[in-house]
Image (cartoon, grey):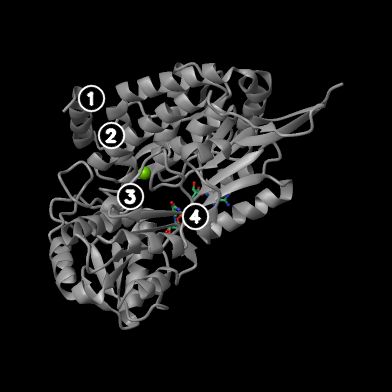
Amino acid sequence: MSTILADGIAEIRATGTLAGLPRNHFIDGRWSTPASGERMASDDPGRGAPFAEFANGDAADVDRAVEAARAAFQKTWRDVAPAERGRILQRMTSLLREEADRFALVECLDSGKRLAEAQGDVRGVIRAFEYYAGAADKLEGARLPLAKDYIGFTLDEPAGVAAQIIPWNYPLSTAARGIAPALAAGCAIVAKPAEQTPFTALMLAELGHRAGLPAGVLNVVTGTGARTGAPLVAHPGIDHITFTGSVATGIRVMHAAAENVTRLVLELGGKSPLVVLGDADLDAALDGVIEAIYENAGQICSAGSRLVLDRRIADGFLDRLVARTRGLRLGHGLDDVDVGPVNSALQLGRIDEHVRCAKAAGNDILCGGDIVHPAGANGGWFFAPTIVAARSPSDPIVTEEIFGPVLAVQTVENLDEAIAIANCTDYALVAGIYTSDLNKANRFARHVDAGQVFVNEYFAGGIEVPFGGNRKSGFGREKGMEGLRSYCRTKSVVMRLR
Ligand code: NAI
Ligand code: MG
């Protein structure tokens, strides 16, 4: 273990917090106190107690950040050569590698996720910056095939000033998958992290400026959705919005965007099916299901929260799954545990309510089902890993996103029924299947409604793979080269020659 990690863990254990966390917004290349002078607290979910304060922003702070971003975009950033933008992103990659442990520690403390998961997130973030550093000078436009006296081509121009609204489940990862391609494309940014997890986005902005980003190119304002997020997405100085979060707030953001005709990408929730057919490698499938629903305590938009089981193997598979689930150790993210806490008391209450309704409706709880207080944890917000045998495909336990460690199980007779069941919710984010028959995998991939399909490894892929949903899961794609193009606008140029 590195000294940064060992010292940080010792400091958290002794003091409950870490010294040197950001307390202010990051606007125009420097720390900036909130106009109101107000601060709010962020909690350590593993203890269920506040550990540090940050700026409680409002519309005045948003105005300053958007103004700084507009000036930086127009005066410098959009005209910086793509290769030079790539070099700055490469320096951000190097600094992130050096400071990875500090980022992971802060992410663990602020979000509640296990330290090992936070370290995995930071590795993904480093990879995202590396990927888009390399992509910045490889965005090629098109030559348009016109008659011989014309020259036609397209330019991929940066969209302008991009707003990023970031949720609390993957604070740094979600920030990075928006910020890295936006910077590579030549956009300036105003990011608003969730009020539950503000710190790593602020740290990333400060790191970006040490790496050479001109002042104003990357700004972060913190605060609540109502006071800070709403004025940001309604701001006429914003050219593009990327929102990740709930369907209800996504709809609100879309209304605000409509007022200014601002383009947007919405990455909303999911209730993603994971199908296990009788011919699958059942050991691999078991590991896949456990990761799909209990990683980050189930607080993942793409969690595999609906298990669709081939009836021929259902009983034996469920017995093993329940036994594995009962053996999972819960506790603070810094301890050696399998599942960490839920991010907030509010989210814990929401999960509990979903499971209570499922019980009241007569669904069968195979394990878990309640709020728990793990031995060794000093307070904190924990929900027992839970498996529910669903009564019917229309039960809310099957159709509603829970965003917690709660798995709904359905059984089917064959692949066609599995596809029909997979498509039976309003969401269409991702879908997974375990089978040894690639013909069946292919048929599933073609017929399931989802933005991404995993075959024989749930969550397979990386920054190279476009990500996003259909229907109530939103629209637009992040990651991959599509993620870069979503921060560009196409300009077509046609010249008449003689
Ligand atoms: P939320 O969608 O309200 O919050 C997400 C982000 O939006 C936060 O940064 C928040 O401050 C901001 N926000 C809130 N109101 C806003 C507004 N009017 N304008 C602009 N920004 C605004 O989600 P919340 O309340 O934290 O969680 C509710 C449910 O949403 C969860 O139980 C879960 O089901 C789902 N969710 C889905 C996520 C995903 O990855 N797709 C992430 C977080 C939550
Ligand atoms: Mg927090």
Find out whether the residues at labels 3 and 2 contact each other: C-beta distance under 8 Å: no
Residue occupied by mark 1: 4
What is the number of the mark on residue 459?
3
Q: Toward which corner of the image does residue 310 lie, by quadrant?
A: bottom left
Nearer the observer: mark 3 or 1; the answer is 3
Judge whether 258 appears above or below 418 on screen. above
Residue occupied by mark 4: 469
**Along the polypeptide, which appears first: circle 1 or circle 4?**
1
Q: Nearer the viewer, residue 357 or 436?
A: 436
Q: Residue at (23%, 44%) from the top-left corner? A: 333
**Along the polypeptide, which appears first: circle 3 or circle 2?**
2
Please rate how many residues cluster around mark 3, counting C-alpha atoms within 10 Å: few if below 14, some from 14 to 19, many from 20: some
Disc 1 and disc 2: Cα gap in Å? 9 Å
Q: Nearer the viewer, residue 402 or 29?
A: 402
Nearer the observer: mark 1 or 4; the answer is 4
Residue occupied by mark 2: 105
